[in-house]
Image (cartoon, coloured by chain):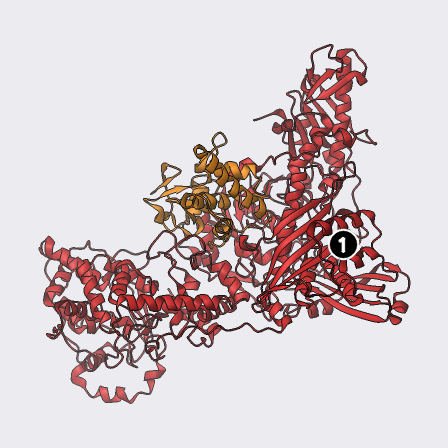
Amino acid sequence: MLALRVNGIDREVSASPDTPLLYVLRNDLALNGPRYGCGLGECGACSVLIDGVARRSCIVTVGAVAGHAVVTLEGLGTRERPHPVQRAFIEAQAAQCGYCMNGMIVGTVALLARCARPTREQIRDALAHNLCRCGAHVEILRAVELAIAQSATDPARS
Amino acid sequence: MTTRASGARTRAHFREAQGVLLVSREPPPPPGRIPGYPTMVGANPAEGPEILVAVWDDGSVTALNGHVDLGTGIRTALGQVVAEELDVPFAAVHVVLGHTASAPNQGATIASSTLQIHAAPLRDAAALARGWLRAAAAQRFRCAEAAVTLRDGIAARADAAAPGIPLGELVAGQHVELFLSGPVTVKAPADYSVVGTSVPRVDMAAKALGEAVFVHDVRVPQMLHGRVIRPPYAGLDVGAFVGHCLESFERDSIAHIDGIVEVVRIHDFLGVVAEREEDAQRAVHELVVHWRAFTPRSDLADVAGAVRANPSTRRELKVRGDVDAALAGAAQRLTRTYLWPYQMHASIGPSCAVADWRDGSLTVWSGTQNPHVLRAELATLMGLPDVAVDVVRLEAAGCYGRNCADDVTADAALLSRAVGRPVRVQLTREQEHAWDPKGSAQLMEIDGGLDAQGAAIAYDYRSSQPSNGAPTLALLLTRTIDPVPDVFHTGDRTAVPPYEYPNLRVAVHDMPPILRSAWIRGVSALPNSFAHECYVDELAAAAGVDPIEYRLRLLEDERAIDLVRATAREAGWRPRTQPQEGGADGDVLKGQGFAYARYFHSRFPGFGAAWAAWVAEVEVNRVTGEVHVRRVVVGQDAGTMINPEGVRHQVHGNVIQTTSRSLLESVETTKGEGTVAAREWGAYPILSFRHVPVIETVLLPRPGEPALGVGESASVPGTAAIANAIYDATGVRLRNPPFTPEVVRAALGATAPTVPPPPLPAPPAVPSAAPGWRRKGLAALAGSALLGALAVATSLVLPRPAMLPAGAAGGDFGAPLIERGRLVAASGNCMGCHTTADGAAYAGGRALDTPFGTIYTTNITPDRETGIGAWSLPAFVRAMREGVSRDGHRLYPAFPYPSFTLMSDDDLLALYAYLMALPPVRAQAPTTQLAFPYGARSLMGLWNALYVAPGPYVADPARSAQWNRGAYLVEGAGHCGACHTPRGALGAEDRGGRYLAGAFVEGWEAPSLVGGGAGPVPWTEAQLYAYLREGSSREHGAAVGPMAEVVGALRALPDADIAAMAHYLASLGPGLDDAEAAALAQRAVDASRARDATMRDGAQRMFEASCGGCHHDGAHPAIHGANLPLALNSSLHSAHPDNLVRVILEGVATPAEGVGGMPAFADSLSDDQIARLAAYMRQRFAPGAPAWAEVVAAVKRVRLAAARP
């Protein structure tokens, strides 16, 4: 059994330590947020926060996260209490198909954690390796700016 | 919230329910077979009338539509249509899309027709229900129907003489079924209150919160995980070889993987089912499959040539006037050819499906775009009646046409039937890229001319598009249907230009497919409009007229004229009669281009969707060839907009996706094979956030006009607008998208400048390219006269005596000695060689690949039978110092006793104590059997006499204690020379002039440790310490491969020992101080950055998309690993590409620092792609070094080395 801490809860799974974290999150822990996109760390659909940094769970093994805190989209917020970034994405309608949305939200949460007021350039750079095929970029950028503005005007929301 | 509307799952549930008002219709007559048109499937009469709307007694409403939401928001928009017509709250409407057990058959979700065409029955059904409800309310109120108002789900008397009644109450206790047959009175648009408002998307919160919404999220009890293994003819679906290439597979090759349930093979269909997903995935990589060679029909190196050579039938769509006569009389004639590339849908999520075969019926959970056609195909595949198949449609990643969603559903069905349990199949990224039915290439040829006044007088248009009918793959792979190329009429969308050319002839050439293809956004219309709109721009330029003014002269459609004018005005169109008036900023030329199209979808003459126009502003770097689309003003007239924000989002998506297709996208095929070579995002990059244009939308209000499809329209003029803007900026016409920097450079006649890198210090001498192990084989020795000479030295070949077995294994050595022995073992990484990947520590059996054959390491646990439990200390010391086993046979120097001989007696005793204290493991290592002459172990005696200088180590009194300690560790127990010193013909380290000068071991280059190393910055003591202690150096990179293992073993050593090794190794180099080294490092990084700006081609894009997420210069956040500058990486500065290639192929499973490794690209990139990537990286990151020669050969060589166990 492997121990890991996901969304603040200690979990145990029986998987080989070299199993990609993504499979364990989806199949053993029934989480939907991180999504398989490429398995090569290229697209960002599987992003999760590991100790607050947005990482690609398809190329992190479950064995490597022992002792680290993993947070998925589900761990950010709920229907009743969405995370401010989730709320901003919903308000800005920042998706078409929504398959990339996990990575965009997780990437934004990580960005705002290290830089509360990023410039547009910094936002684009931060999300440059999160791929979206539908072309929801305009709405996504708007969502990030909305999240920044809301946290600036209402720190309680952040 | 569960409502009755969301509870009904099948037609029977609806029909048997009480407390419901249903509106149904007789299914439309079967469409029949339209020549040259892909199969459409009629409704099955056995399923009875189609249910469109159900109003339930709890006030909820079900709306059923046969189309599906591909991420465009039609679930929301259709809900608005029904809520509007029924006057119920929007939230009361539950929309069911595409579920074959309940939804009507309305064909595939294509041609942007959902709202334009297929919403009408839903609206009419809602209107019919509303009429019934109103009448029922009037009866309750005992008033005239006209006196009843319906609002927000409440029926009330207009005069408010009685309290309102919720609509649900009107159906309580009843089952009412209405039939939609004739025309129905619907609401006047002026009365709309829900339609025309930007209701938020109903699916957004669930997606933002990670709720289960996608087909990928389906989990059913007992579900297994499947993967398929696709044939090598990637992306080809016609030809006699299809379905006939799988010779055999080796079941045993995956016997070591736990939880494999079944390997399923039906002709060329091959799949693996496992309990766990990662095991199925692993089986895909490790199952040994033997495929027959196949003969492709066409090499796609020349796409235009392949299309021209494809047999075709001409079909004239429209003829006006006398084109030939007009052409003959033209004052100026323009003959132009335009070529559209193969492109892919490139869904972000590879397709996935779950199937459950049970008792002769099949349920599939699918992301299909055409559920009813898929149901018919699955029925054919499985030999079932269609009603025994239930297609439950769930959302998938956006597809913009037909991706692999149907294919994977059929795959899952076959695997579920084979194992009798539900199976989830997830295609890999590589499979989705390779087998995605591509958007077809298209060749457009135009002959036309102007009269003396510049008026366009003739337009002769020919378009050739290989068909895109792509049968579902499993049907072909299982030979259920034959791989016979079918010809469809799919090239005719928007083939007729919008301009009133007085003499016009439009013909399409229908032809069979080349690559497997299916419809993609703007199918054939985007290429056709690209040609029309570039050509009219060329006419305007030839006539010396502003291109918008010229178009307006040729347009008669009033809505088109309005849109063109409105878009131009909003964009600040700058009228011009010649290019290059937009100015420049240094090397960056600026231009503005226009295009207009109304998308006509479906088979000619088809239906007109929304009108669209673009003004694109571009910046073209005339040196690098980069095109940046800076701003797009896009106008659209979509009639009534049901959800204006939804329309705007579609416009944005169309603009961004089309910009990506125009600038970047073309499917790479394999030379000589014509198969798809692009299997991940590096080989098929799409537009990133960095390059998204500013988009301004001009949505013309057309209240009351019919709603028109917007899913594709705004794409259609895009590529032409960009090409016309590039012309405006540069004066050069580009007719073959994508407009990549290399295409633009070639068109401009520019060659990428080479910024000379700042001078670097002369690199340390690279070791001679005569690597030892691996490169020299038997041939090097076979004719050697040496052997004869040696043979006479018989005294040296006499066997050595066996030593008596020790008494009891081990001994009482005491914990301090054992602990010291543990450190000695760590310093030599004994465990590394004496342990297999999944074996017990020190139990031996690891195969060492040497030029002389495979040598297996021995069990060095204290097991008496199979290990060294019977070895006395003297026997152990003899082995370590002289290379003689306890029984007297000679050991091969793959066991580095020529180094170990330097170890001190005390260390050997400690090591012995440690090993004897290990738990004994009974494990017989395989016997090493080398071929003649190496099999004769006795000859090793001669070898020892020649090459082994007996120890122990003698300290150099002229050096410090630290230096001597370092030398002792490096040369003795550490046996660094075993890998880092080149070996001679007889496998001995060359300890003369080339000691530690670099060598090859097991396909890895162990770089030189002398003279400062191969990189641009000589090793300093501090960096050596960091590298040996932490596994990475910011001036050299991270330890990978065997060296990573060594660093892992060294973790046990105290800092002082690591410092001593670093001190000693630094003394072999030039002795830079840290500041000098840091300055050199900075210069190397700067040089590579300067170089980067000048290199813009496919390899650069591949690097950026495949590698750039993690390997970058700090422009975005760190994702994984240390992100050490590649400009300093030793592998990139080596004379050999092997280590770089090896890391690309195998990745780095356990990185030296941080969480997350580097993925292996062996199955994602071809040899050719890796070679291009490596060549690019060499040029960019080692700008002073010569290009590597024969990189493709190196990739093949390294693949072989990496494949060895």
**Is the residue B369 above or below the residue B908 in the image?**
above
Chain B: give its colour: red
Q: Quadrant of the C terminus of chain B?
A: bottom left
Q: Quadrant of the N terminus of chain B?
A: top right
Q: Which residue is mark 1?
A: B493
Q: Can residue B486 be seen in this snapshot? A: no
Q: Nearer the viewer, residue B595 or B930?
A: B595
Q: Residues within 10 Å of mark 1 (few under 14, many from 20)?
A: many
From the viewer's perspective, tell me whether residue B632 is left or right of residue B285: right
Q: Nearer the viewer, residue B269 or B944?
A: B944
From the viewer's perspective, tell me whether residue B1161 is left or right of residue B58: left
Q: Nearer the viewer, residue B1180 or B882?
A: B1180
User: x%, y% of residue B1073?
Assistant: 26, 68
Q: Residue at x 90, y 69 (%)?
A: B325
Q: Residue at x 32, y 76 (%)?
A: B764
Q: Can residue B151 be seen in this snapshot? A: yes
Residue at disc 1, secondary structure: loop
User: x%, y% of residue B576?
Assistant: 74, 61
Q: Chain of mark 1?
A: B
Count every numbered label the image shows and give the total: 1
User: x%, y% of residue B227?
Assistant: 51, 51
**Is the residue B565 above or below the residue B776 in the image?**
above
Residue B1058, quarter of the rendered image: bottom left
User: x%, y% of residue B1167?
Assistant: 50, 68
Q: Amino acid at mark 1?
A: Arg
- Chain in orange in the render: A
From the viewer's perspective, tell me whether residue A63 is left or right of residue B237: left
